[in-house]
Image (tube, helix red, strand yellow):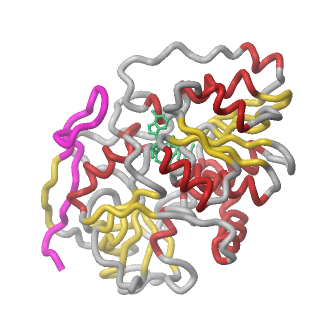
């Protein structure tokens, strides 16, 4: 076991695309837990697009990381030492330890559904608590089912379709009897989305005629657009929406590192087609955690939903893996293996 806590700090706020020099890797003493706390050693660190937002000091639904602060992030860890009756050394927990090898968590002290939560390694691989059975999976579930409300026979389009959220959205749409059409950044990703995940079609947003490519795959128009990227894809989708279409606005990754915001899409059609557009943040939907875990665990167990993990090795790989995630280098859920997972053979 290392004798220090290795950490990745935010060194500077990038104006555009993050660079490795915006991060600093340092070591600090391993923190000691007080009464009611647990000391955790990170096994899996989740890398997520929202972390780009935490690097900015702008008005948002969550506070930014301070310069010199540890980058935030979801973690699956092993409890090394417990001073809380509900946990013991050797337990595995889902928490919010950030980009570091060790952290202390106050059990029961973090609000919302993503605080320290004991995991059962026999129920599912513990890494899935950061992906298909965690925050990204739940984002797909509530965004699609509660806001998108797809009906059998409708057409659902989802962008970033080969990623953690998008891959689940299309598969849930299929389970509900809808036609699922993905949008992704490369032919390889589109092939994965159709052949392995079972979407009906997938188009590349790099196609010279994205509007025409979507139109060919959505001959009856678009009833639900699950928007993970904003920008040009939203512009190509909007003229093709059917009356009373629903658009869950989940993310706008195409603009997370933009230094200037593009001219917005023309929203006139939203009125004419009586479209419902709703932004959402998954952490407001904690009341759906039980339903999500019940349904998605069963779908994964039965092989009706598939998932992939893209694994970077070692904490020091986190900055480059994060930069790669923003550039679309990941296929499936981007994780960092910070320490060996004793539950995986
Ligand atoms: N509202 C919420 O509560 C909530 C919760 C979780 C995630 N989100 C949002 O959901 C979206 C997907 O997150 P995720 O965790 O599933 O990430 P992900 O899809 O696994 O990874 C991000 C993907 O975005 C795509 N991308 C990057 N730049 C793009 C661009 N300019 N245009 C189009 N696509 C681009 C890349 O795929 P390509 O190769 O296809 O470009 C990349 O693989 C993000 O916008 C995220 O912020 C929102």
- Quadrant in which residue 172 is drawn: bottom right
Q: Which quarter shows the C terminus?
A: bottom left
The magenta segment is 1-23
Q: Is residue 147 magenta?
A: no
Q: Residue at x 42, y 59 (%)?
A: 74
Q: Quadrant of residue 277?
A: top right
Say which of 69 and 76 sits in front: 76
x and y percentages locating residue 296 in the rendered image? 67, 67
Looking at the image, which is closer to me, 238 or 9? 238
Q: Is residue 282 left or right of residue 22?
A: right
Quadrant containing the N terminus in the rendered view? bottom left
Q: Residue 104 lies in what quarter of the image?
A: bottom left
Q: Nearer the viewer, residue 106 or 91?
A: 91
**Relative image position of residue 249 (x, y in whole percent):** 63, 35
Residue 81 vs 324, above or below: the answer is below
* Above or below: residue 67 compared with residue 169: above
Query: x, y (%) of residue 92?
Result: 43, 79
Tally the marks.
0
**Residue 308: percent from left, percent from top:** 50, 64
Q: Is residue 221 left or right of 326 when viewed as pictured?
A: right
Let me know if residue 13 is in the magenta part: yes
Residue 13 sits above or below residue 182 on the image: above
Which residue is pictured at 60% across the width and 49% down the height? 282
Residue displayed at 30% across by 81% down: 80
């Amino acid at each position: 076991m290392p004798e220090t806590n290795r950490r990745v700090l935010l060194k500077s706020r990038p104006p555009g695309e993050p660079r490795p020099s915006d991060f600093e890797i340092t070591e600090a003493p391993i923190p000691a837990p007080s009464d009611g706390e647990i000391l955790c050693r990170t096994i899996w660190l989740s890398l997520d697009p929202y972390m780009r937002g935490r690097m900015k000091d702008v008005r948002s639904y969550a506070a930014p990381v301070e310069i010199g602060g540890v980058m935030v992030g979801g973690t699956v860890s092993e409890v090394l030492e417990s001073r809380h009756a509900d946990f013991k050394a050797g337990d595995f927990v889902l928490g919010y330890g950030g980009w570091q090898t060790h952290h202390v968590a106050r059990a029961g002290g973090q609000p919302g559904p993503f605080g320290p939560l004991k995991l059962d390694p026999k129920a599912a691989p513990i890494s899935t608590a950061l992906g298909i059975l965690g925050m990204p999976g739940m984002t797909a579930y509530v965004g699609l089912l509660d806001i998108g409300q797809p009906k059998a026979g409708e057409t659902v389009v989802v962008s970033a379709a080969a990623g953690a959220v998008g891959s689940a959205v299309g598969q849930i749409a299929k389970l509900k009897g809808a036609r699922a059409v993905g949008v992704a950044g490369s032919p390889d990703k589109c092939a994965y989305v159709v052949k392995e995940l079972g979407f009906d079609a997938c188009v590349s947003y790099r196609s010279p005629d994205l509007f025409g490519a979507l139109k060919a795959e959505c001959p009856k128009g678009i009833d639900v657009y699950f928007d993970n990227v904003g920008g040009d894809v939203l512009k190509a989708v909007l003229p093709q929406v059917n009356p009373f279409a629903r658009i869950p606005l989940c993310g706008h990754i195409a603009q997370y590192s933009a230094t200037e915001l593009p001219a917005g899409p023309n929203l006139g059609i939203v009125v004419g087609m009586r479209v419902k557009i709703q932004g959402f943040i998954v952490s407001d939907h904690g009341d759906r955690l039980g339903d999500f875990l019940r349904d998605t665990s069963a779908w994964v167990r039965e092989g009706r939903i598939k998932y992939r993990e893209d694994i970077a090795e070692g904490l020091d790989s986190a900055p480059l893996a994060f930069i790669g995630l923003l550039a679309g280098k990941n296929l499936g859920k981007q994780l960092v293996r910070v320490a060996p997972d004793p539950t995986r053979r």
